[in-house]
């Protein structure tokens, strides 16, 4: 997948392109990341990318021209069919389903706003979709774009070491993940649940499913509403 970033602060993205799971995906060529900086598409001495809002009010807005040219440059790198996403607190809230959907795209162009946002006409002309990472306001779209990159990359085939890892994560099957334990077997008097030491894979699978169901019911009952349960899940939840 090609992910083209349109941002005034490309260096911020080193956090995802150089480290961890996403960094490995980039090194392996499973994800290609490119940058287009609106500041490189200015023509004045000060390389101005912002201007005052019509109608007055606090703060500045990103100007259309440098942004539009940066998006055009991103399209050249990512391909003309790339989906253009503007990270915005007014967008559709990102969730697991959206991450899976985006992971099926060939290419994404992620546009990070700054200041008080961007001129509305730029959104109308260039953007396919607006995505928010939550009901709060960030100072810029870069962190939100990195959240999108991370969660989408995890869904790409071959990215996670163990093929089942992504399927077992919280939300993948509509449930929260079960609790996990590693060595030592005893920590401050607390023992690892015995079933996990049993070597009985079927019992372990059932225990994990029961824990995931219980946790979801306790912490996020909303996830269970509208989720169809298997007969086994119904029975485990009722136990
Ligand atoms: N005035 C804008 C509003 O209230 O809708 C907020 C502008 S915010 C200070 C600057 C930029 O940060 C936005 O253009 C957007 O790209 C990004 N941003 C802020 N909060 C976000 C969120 N929750 N999700 C995604 N992007 C966000």
Image (spheres, grey):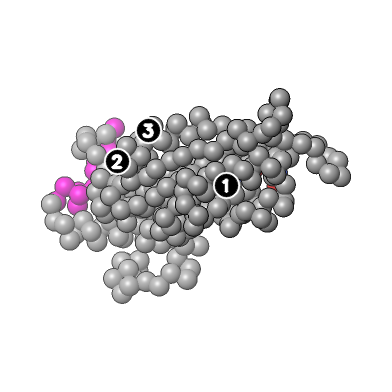
Q: Which residue is mark 3?
A: 19
Q: Out of 102 and 136, give the one closest to the viewer.
A: 102
Say which quarter of the image contains residue 202. Answer: bottom left
Q: Earlier in the sequence, mark 1 or mark 3?
A: 3
Compared across the picture, whether 204 is left or right of 172 comes to left
Q: Which residue is mark 1?
A: 72
Residue count near mark 2 (Cα–Cα under 10 Å), binned few <14, some 14–19, many ≥20: few
Q: In the displayed image of the protein, which residue is found farthest to the right?
A: 55
Horizontal and vertical percent position of residue 69:
62, 43
Q: Out of 206 and 48, give the one closest to the viewer.
A: 48
Name the image quarter holding the C terminus: bottom left
Q: Residue at x 26, y 54 (%)?
A: 164
Q: Which residues are magenta?
A: 188-198
The relative height of residue 10 versus residue 194 in the rendered view (above or below) is: above
**C-alpha span from label 1 to label 3:** 28 Å
Q: Earlier in the sequence, mark 1 or mark 2?
A: 2
* Residue 136 visible in the current orientation: no
Q: In the displayed image of the protein, which residue is found farthest to the bottom?
A: 231
Whether residues under marks 2 and 3 lie with C-beta atoms below 8 angstroms apart, the answer is no
Residue count near mark 1 (Cα–Cα under 10 Å), binned few <14, some 14–19, many ≥20: some
Q: Residue at x 66, y 55 (%)?
A: 125
Residue count near mark 3 (Cα–Cα under 10 Å), binned few <14, some 14–19, many ≥20: few
Whether residues under marks 1 and 2 lie with C-beta atoms below 8 angstroms apart, the answer is no
Taking the image in four quarters, ligand 1 sits in the one at top right
Compared across the picture, whether 104 is left or right of 6 comes to left
Q: Secondary structure at mark 3?
A: loop
Q: Residue at x 72, y 47 (%)?
A: 119
Q: Earlier in the sequence, mark 2 or mark 3?
A: 3
Compared across the picture, whether 224 is left or right of 157 comes to right
Q: For marks 1 and 2, give the one nearer the viewer.
A: 1
């Amino acid at each position: 997948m090609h992910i083209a970033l349109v941002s005034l602060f490309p260096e911020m993205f080193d956090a995802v392109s150089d480290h961890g799971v996403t960094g490995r995906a980039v090194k392996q060529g499973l994800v290609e990341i490119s940058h287009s900086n609106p500041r490189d598409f200015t023509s004045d001495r000060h390389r101005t990318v912002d201007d005052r809002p019509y109608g007055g009010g606090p703060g500045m807005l990103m100007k259309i021209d440098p942004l539009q040219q940066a998006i055009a440059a991103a399209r050249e790198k990512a391909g003309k069919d790339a989906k253009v996403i503007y990270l915005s607190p007014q967008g559709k809230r990102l969730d697991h389903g959206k991450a899976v959907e985006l992971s099926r795209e060939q290419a994404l162009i992620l546009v990070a706003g700054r200041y008080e946002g961007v001129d509305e006409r730029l959104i109308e002309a260039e953007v396919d979709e607006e995505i928010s990472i939550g009901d709060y306001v960030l100072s810029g779209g870069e962190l939100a774009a990195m959240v999108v990159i991370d969660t989408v990359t995890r869904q790409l085939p071959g990215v996670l070491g163990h093929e089942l890892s992504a399927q077992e994560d919280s939300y993948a099957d509509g449930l929260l993940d079960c609790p996990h334990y590693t060595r030592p077997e005893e920590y401050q008097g607390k023992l690892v649940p015995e079933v996990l030491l049993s070597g009985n894979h079927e019992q372990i699978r059932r225990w994990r499913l029961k824990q995931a169901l219980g946790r979801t019911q306790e912490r996020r009952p909303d996830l269970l509403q509208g989720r169809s349960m298997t007969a086994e899940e119904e029975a485990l939840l009722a136990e």
